[in-house]
Image: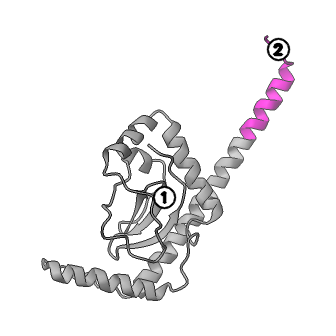
Amino acid sequence: MLIHLPKRLCVAVAMVLAGLAAAQGANDASLVKDFAGRIQKYLDLRKTADISKKPTDSPDKLVYQKQQAEEKIQQSRPAAKQGDIFTPPIGAYFKKQIAATLRGAQGEKVRASLRRAEPLPDIRLQVNHPYPAHLPLQSTPPTLLLNLPRLPGELQYRIVGSTFVLFDTAANLIVDLLPDAVSGP
């Protein structure tokens, strides 16, 4: 059954929907700005930890530098907890972006990429703790990365089971995490 609505009502509904979309866009922009500020705060803290980045070809020195970075950052963030960076509103934004990507035109490619990677179990990860040595670092599909805020070189997004992880590569530390963010491939 086709319902004919008055033209004025259709225009009014279209204006309301456009206004809602604009408000959502502004809200998303403020969330991304808040996220970027939290990332910068972490990087500033990281700088004050005086992490050595001296170039070396020695595997032993590289391991030592990574351990030193891990310890210094952990000591600099003793009260770090889940949600310090992925606050509830920022977490909701990320979950929305991830879900939209998985439902979108490239969603099947992203799911296939996640399936091809070495499967990672849903294990309990902790903020400000090292990434488990026995787990491979599954990369985040590029198509998904395109829909998320860019990160500075020291940080990466990772996926472990259904958990979305913010990972410090130099220190091998979990900076923050977002449980139940990625639906199964």
Q: Nearer the viewer, residue 184 or 13?
A: 184
Q: Quadrant of residue 52?
A: bottom left
Quadrant in which the C terminus appears: top left
In the structure shown, which secondary structural element does the residue marked by tag 2 occupy? loop
Q: Is residue 81 left or right of residue 11?
A: left
Task: Name the residue at 80% across, 31% down.
Answer: 13
Can residue 4 be seen in the rendering of this structure?
Answer: yes
Q: Amino acid at mark 2?
A: Ile
Can residue 56 be seen in the rendering of this structure?
Answer: no
Q: Quadrant of residue 69?
A: bottom left
The residue where tag 1 is placed is 163
The residue where tag 2 is placed is 3
In the structure shown, which secondary structural element does the residue marked by tag 1 occupy? strand
- Position of residue 178 measured from the top left corner of the image (x, y, whole percent): 53, 61
Which residue range is magenta in the image? 1-19
The number of callouts visible is 2
Q: Residue furthest left?
A: 57
Task: Name the residue at 37% across, 86% down.
Answer: 71
Q: Please state which of the two labelled residues, at mark 2 or mark 1, is closer to the viewer.
A: 1
Q: Amino acid at mark 1?
A: Thr
Q: Residue furthest top?
A: 1
- Position of residue 165 measured from the top left corner of the image (x, y, whole percent): 45, 62
Disc 2 and disc 1 in contact, CB within 8 angstroms: no
- Position of residue 40 measured from the top left corner of the image (x, y, whole percent): 49, 73
Q: State the separation of the CA atoms marked 2 and 1.
A: 45 Å
